[in-house]
Structure formats: C-alpha cells, structure tokens
Amino acid sequence: VIPAEAGIQTKITFMFNLKDKNVLVTGGAGFVGSHLVEELIKLKANVIVVDINLDKHSYLFTENLHKKSTVINLDICDYKKLLGLIKKYKIEFIFHLAAQALVENAYVDPKYTFYNNTLSTVNVLEAVRLNPQIKGIVVASSDKSYGKLHKAKYFETDPLSGDHPYDTSKSITDLISTTYYKTYKIPVVVTRFGNIYGEGDLNFSRIIPGIMKSVIRNSQLKIRSNGQYVRDYLYVKDVVAGYLLLAQNIEKVRGEAFNFGSNDTLSVLQLIKVIEGVLDRKINYKILNIAKNEIPYQSLDYSKIKKTLGWKPKENIKSTAKKIFEWYKR
C-alpha cells in the first residue's frame, strides 16, 4: 500500500502484483525488451513475448529466456492477430516496447517508421480499451519526442515538438497514449528515456555497442556525428526497474508521462574517454560528421519519477562498462 502524504487526503492505492499474471511484452526479443522479460520471469509472471524479429543472437535467446516464456513471431500492426493473441493468452498487463527505434533508419524510410510506430501503438491501446481484464499498459516513448528545445534539461511539462521522422513518430506515440487516457480513461503510463545501453544491444550503429565492437576487433570506430552531441546514458537494468515500478503502481501513475534521466550526461567524445579509462584501452576512432537531423543536446530531468515513486539510476558508465565489455567478448 502506498501511504498518503501527511496532511493530504488521497485515495489509497494498492500495488499491482505481477506474479502469476499474463504479461505481454511487445518488442520483447529486442535489447530492452529481453532484459524486461528476464526480470518479469524472476517476478514469476507468465510472460508472452511478441516480436516481428526473432534474432537468435538476441539477449532473449543467448540467456535462454525464450525457454521460460512464450515467444511468438507476430507483427502487432496486424490488429486482428494481436487481438486474437490477447484473448488466447488472457493478457492482464502490457509493456509496449515494439518500435522502429533507429534515428538513421527513420530518415531513410520515414513511411515505415510512421506506419510501424503509430499503428502499433494505436492497436495495443485499442486492445486495452476493448479488454477490461487488462489492468494496465506501459508505453515506451523517448526523449526524442520533445524534439529540439534548446534548453539544458527537458521536463515532462515541455511541449512535444518532434520535427524529423523518428522524433515525430515518438511525439505521436506520446499523444496517442494521452488521448486514450483522456478520452477512455484506460490505465496507460508513458516512459521517456535517453540513450539506453547494456549487455545484449546488437545495434552496432549505436555508440556503446560500436565502441565495444571496435575494441574487441581492434578496428576503427566510425562516429557519424561531430562527436559533440550530448545525451543521457542510462543502464538497461535501471530502465527495467523503472518499467516495473510503473507497472506495480499503475493506479497511481495512470495518465502520466515520466522522464527517466541519468547521471551520465556526456558527449560522444567524453563517453569514449570514460570507457577508455575503465577498459584501459585506447579507442581508435574517426569522426565522419555525417549525421542528419540529430539533436545537439538532450538531457532529461527525472525529479518527477524520483518524487513520485523514488526511482533514480543506480548504475553508471564507470560501474558497468567492464561487465558489458565482457558480455560482448563472449
């Protein structure tokens, strides 16, 4: 039970227990989704993983999580199939992580990015609206949903103003979720994270997997940007802890959006220097400066989630780089 603050009359809210619940994770074979599945299994939830891409090299398979969950190859843009799956497995909670998640891919193929990220979100929210046995849904948005705000810290009260394909697709994801809450009162909460890193990220165009690959193979790291773009870097286990905290407190946080920031707010070149120090290796890199439509500086203020549910990041680059490196070396 979450107690009321002293002197304030509030409705007492009971925590939602995920144990023995039928939990759907869309995008559950992806990098973050796999880690979420791992923790849900530890909580003894009945986990149903849906993903359009079941890569046997993903964390879901390398850590044998697929043997402890139900894994289904399905495109959730197909609403009838999604609805059939929800009814078949009597889904009681959803984590919606499925998306086209790469900025550069969105630039090359905006149509697919809008189609995938928008329709998949509408479909899962509509499924929640029509199935009252689903007690909540956590929707993964992004710091990119804010667009370019030209300020040091982004707050949840800032406008959603994406102006390039990926950014706008996440702004839309956010707005659709808010619309379903305001219109139908469905139990939805939105998350906004910065750059997530950790074991199992196989998108080597991302900076940290790219660094690990270049060190292991003793090859040159190609930096697409000018090396000066600043981002929050948040360890995947801290991300998953945030997802679970929101799910367990869904009645308290429904209709809200939360930033999950980091204590590592670094430029690419600063990040390289930190990892060089931890690994005691010199990283060979070349700055290409060809990145398009990237936001120069983004950092999320996370005081709202800290005040509401007590979340804060436990890890940082220095505490995790070595074990992540060892994972990639396997």
Image (cartoon, helix red, strand yellow):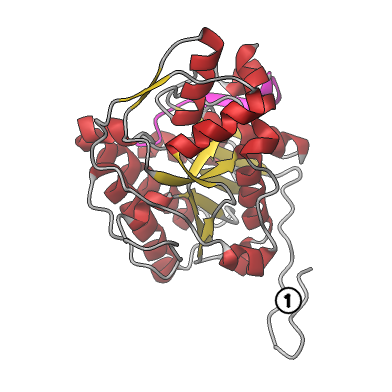
- Outermost residue, bottom direction? 7
Query: Which is more toward the observer, 149 or 83?
Result: 149
In percent of the image, x 24 and y 30: which residue is there?
Answer: 290
At label 1, counting other C-alpha atoms closer than 10 Å, the crowd grade (few under 14, some 14-19, many 20 or more) is: few
Image quarter of residue 159: bottom left
User: Quadrant where the C terminus lies?
Assistant: top right
Q: Identity of the amino acid at label 1?
A: Ile
Q: Position of residue 220 (x, y in %)?
A: 41, 14
Counting every numbered tag in the picture gives: 1
Residue in the image at 57% along x and 53% along y: 134
* 140 left or right of 286 in image: right
Relative height, residue 54 to residue 289 (above, below): above
Instruction: Please say if 156 is above or below 91.
Output: below
Q: Nearer the viewer, residue 139 or 161?
A: 161
Q: Position of residue 303 (x, y in %)?
A: 58, 66
The residue singled out by tag 1 in the image is 12
Is residue 98 visible to the viewer in this orientation of the structure? no
Residue 180 visible in the shown view: yes
Q: Secondary structure at mark 1?
A: loop
Q: Residue 160 or 273: which is nearer the viewer?
A: 273
Quadrant assignment for the N terminus: bottom right
Per the image, is 76 magenta? Answer: yes
What residue range appears in magenta?
64-77
Would residue 309 appear left or right of 107 to someone viewing this image?
A: right
Q: Position of residue 120 (x, y in %)?
A: 37, 42
* Magenta stretch: includes residue 214: no
Give the percent coordinates (x, y) of residue 253.
Answer: 58, 66
